[in-house]
Image (cartoon, helix red, strand yellow):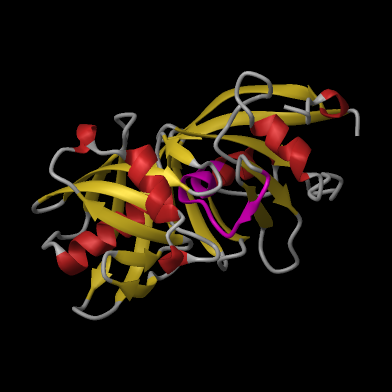
């Protein structure tokens, strides 16, 4: 591979590199170059690399790679961006689509050129302030979000033996009844605070509804100032129909010299 066409997008401040890999030529096992591509200053820079691949059971398949080159089952904001991107390259034929992920099939709808809604997998494996919302999240309610030690405390919890061996994402949240959440996220794979987290927004919202008296739809404010909306139903025991809605934006497109990526830094 000499050059790699890509598109840079962000969803509510969460930024991604998106690649059309329907021909299956992307070297997914070259994790060092994936990480180099995602690195800021020396690469393109992003919080996730997303591939659109062919699927025999859906419109397409989404593959998501963290900035360290590891693969994750799902990314909520990435899924919203990939829906927009897939339509732009013809992998999805209309505003509504279904695509394959490692966390299960996801349905998406492009509401307008800036707003995308996805149906999220049902949250599961609830424990105290913990839930799997496609990927694992631990919720830390705080009173002062700006004073939260997201990197230090987030890293400590992410690496806690309780969540070994795979670790967890960590969301620091302020709940405001009846329907508001403000959040900051320490994201595994990024190993730092991210600008937003879609699965974290869902996790924070469902824990808020289940344990902290919030009501759907829940409005979630990200650290970059964008708003995500989490909606669904809760019968007192089970969640269903969970959706995540928010803004997406194409930032730029380009071509990357794959072989020249610096994998030694």
Q: Farthest right residue?
A: 1
Tell me the quarter of the picture where residue 131 sits: bottom left
Front residue of 210 and 122: 210
Q: Is residue 116 left or right of residue 131?
A: right
Q: Farthest bottom residue?
A: 237
Magenta stretch, residue numbers: 69-81
Q: Farthest top residue?
A: 41
Q: How many marks?
A: 0
Q: Is 59 located above or below residue 42 in the figure? A: below
Front residue of 12 and 203: 203
Residue 70 within the segment the image draws in magenta:
yes
Location of the C terminus by quadrant is: top right
Q: Position of residue 78 (x, y in %)?
A: 53, 45
Front residue of 199 and 248: 199
The residue depicted at 55 percent of the width and 31 percent of the height is 9
Q: Position of residue 91 (x, y in %)?
A: 70, 48
The residue depicted at 68 percent of the width and 57 percent of the height is 61
Q: Position of residue 104 (x, y in %)?
A: 57, 68
Q: Position of residue 88 (x, y in %)?
A: 64, 37
Q: Is residue 203 left or right of residue 180?
A: right
Q: Is residue 221 left or right of residue 70?
A: left
The residue depicted at 56 percent of the width and 47 percent of the height is 189
Location of the N terminus by quadrant is: top right
Residue 91 within the segment the image draws in magenta:
no
Q: Is 47 located above or below residue 242 in the figure? A: above
Front residue of 208 and 136: 136
């Amino acid at each position: 591979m000499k050059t790699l066409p890509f598109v840079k997008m962000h969803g509510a401040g969460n930024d991604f590199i998106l690649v059309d890999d329907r021909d299956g030529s992307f070297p997914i096992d070259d994790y060092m170059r994936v990480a180099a591509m995602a690195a800021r200053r020396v690469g393109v820079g992003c919080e996730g690399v997303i591939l659109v691949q062919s699927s025999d059971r859906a419109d397409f398949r989404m593959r998501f790679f963290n900035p360290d080159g590891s693969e994750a089952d799902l990314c909520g904001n990435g899924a919203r961006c990939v829906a927009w991107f897939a339509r732009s390259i013809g992998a999805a034929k209309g505003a509504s689509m279904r695509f394959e992920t490692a966390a299960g099939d996801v349905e998406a709808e492009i509401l307008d050129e800036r707003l995308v809604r996805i149906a999220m997998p049902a949250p599961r494996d609830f424990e105290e302030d913990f839930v799997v919302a496609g990927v694992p999240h631990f919720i830390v309610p705080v009173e002062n979000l700006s004073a939260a030690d997201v990197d230090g405390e987030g890293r400590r919890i992410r690496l806690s033996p309780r969540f070994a061996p795979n670790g967890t994402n960590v969301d620091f949240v302020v709940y405001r009844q009846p329907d508001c959440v403000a959040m900051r996220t320490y994201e595994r794979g990024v190993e730092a605070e991210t600008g937003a987290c879609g699965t974290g927004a869902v996790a924070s919202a469902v824990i808020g509804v289940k344990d902290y008296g919030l009501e759907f739809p829940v409005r979630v404010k990200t650290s970059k100032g964008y708003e995500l909306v989490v909606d669904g139903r809760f019968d007192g025991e089970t969640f269903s129909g969970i959706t995540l809605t928010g803004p997406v934006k194409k930032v730029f497109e380009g071509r990357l010299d794959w072989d020249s990526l610096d994998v030694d830094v």
